Amino acid sequence: MRDSAFSPAHPALAAQRVRVPVNAPATLFVVVDTEEEFDWSAPFSRQSTSVTAMRHIGRAQRLFDRFSIVPTYVVDYPVASQPEGVVPLAEFAAVIGNLRAARFARDGAWRTTAAFGALDELRHTHIPLALMHELVRWDRQFDWTHRFYHSNNWVAIAARHCFDELLLTADPIEFAIGTNFVFETGFTNLQFVALSALARDAGDPMFETMVKSIQTDEARHAQIGRAVLEILVKSDREYAQRLVDKWFWRTWHLFSVLTGFSMDYLTPLSARRASFKEFIEEWILSQFLEVIDAYGLARPWYWDTFTTSLDHYHHMVYASAYTYRTTVWFDFVVPGPQERAWLAQKYPASWPALAPVWERIDAGWRESDPDLDFAAHGSAIVTFCDMCQFVLSEGTPARNSAQTLVRGDRKYIFCSEPCRWIFESEPERYAGHRDVVKRVLAGEAPGNLAAILTQYFGLTQETWGRDVQRGNYDWLVRPAKPRPILPGAAEAPDERRP
Ligand SMILES: [Fe+2]
Ligand SMILES: [Fe+2]
Ligand SMILES: [Zn+2]
């Protein structure tokens, strides 16, 4: 069902089998199919995205409540619940970065463009907040569009660690290279074109329009990056190279998690056009390498590490995040046999080593009953990189590339050589930061999983991430369990799937 052309695009909204006992009385199912407003007699228009009628849905719900009816709402905003929906407050930090450039940049054209950039970033903050707010009534997870950045969730800590440095503390030159050149020219500008096209194919006009509208601003912000880089290379090539190398790695980790998850796991197979790796190679790398070459810069020194990372990193983090899905605010899916065949074909260099990881996860679900998310879930506390703040998932399943460093009386651990290099280049900037594990050890955060989820990450049973199918996958065959037969009881028909 999930791969059918008529299924919702996001696995979180995918159809689930309803099991009705054989002798059950007649049951009323109420399905409310919500849609944008449009004129049935007019030709199809992509401009018809208004949803004002939805403001009154509460009246219908109150009526349902009176009769104890629990309706199923069919919502056509599937892509919106992906991780991209939760960065608006990072956009707000970008307002500050742009305002600083609007005040202190070294050239009038740069200052004026940055002033417009600040207005754009304010718009980028408001759009997702306004659009996702309406969806909270259907799914409390959408509340995280606003909550996320204020929380102590580990992903929020990683996002703030990167964005606070880039957007709130960098000077206009570092801001221009890190944000306008690497982040916006290298990643977001073209990525938003692709994301918007993907949303269009998946039948999600709201997300398509939102991303397309943000992308046009991004194209303007990107103009600043190349101009500043050109002058910086002339006056201090070594510094220009260091900034490009630093921000390419930091940006890469964030993007491989955000976009890698969305493209290779959360988009249904039928709507996938290219793998994340193909997308990065075609849309990001070719133009990034062309531009740095044109300005006489070298590829970042860790290019071999990056190439390995391109095959492995987002797969490793996805498997890890799936295993600890209750620590985040959105749902995960186990790739099925067809998806694994697709991944094997797209990632011949890494999938053979990654497949057994999923076989272990399958085994966890096979041995436990469906709906028991915690039965197929990690329980040991994980370790984070002291630089990027993501789990230590660089390298390959056979060779983890973690690195350590002793500085004063503290020992630091990093997921990779580039993360250690960034730390060592400016240790005084990063040394004082404490990740979640160190906060637990310092007594600032609770040490057991349930307490850290609810008291520190701000999640509830309603909002924390689950397996989308609750472990009920058609392809997952559970061994039949012996059923106790009570004396005198007639044997009931077995409704459990084998
Ligand atoms: Fe933005
Ligand atoms: Fe921007
Ligand atoms: Zn790292």
Image (spheres, helix red, strand yellow):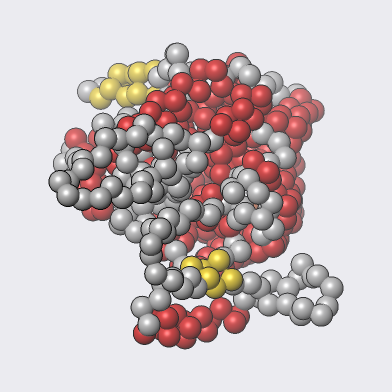
For residue 309, side relative to residue 279 (left or right): left
Residue at image location 68% in from the left, 77% down from the top: 37
Residue at image location 41% in from the left, 52% down from the top: 329
For residue 317, side relative to residue 195 (left or right): left
Classify residue 150 by image quadrant.
Answer: bottom left
Classify residue 161 by image quadrant.
Answer: top left
| Residue 301 spot, x, y in % from top left | 60, 18
Res. 462 in view? yes
Is the residue 304 above or below the residue 483 in the image? above
Instruction: Give the total number of marks visible in the rendering.
Output: 0
Is the residue 147 above or below the residue 308 in the image? below
For residue 377, side relative to residue 409 (left or right): right
| Residue 208 spot, x, y in % from top left | 69, 58
For residue 49, side relative to residue 464 (left or right): right
In the rendered image, the quadrant that contains the C terminus is top left
| Residue 466 spot, x, y in % from top left | 39, 48
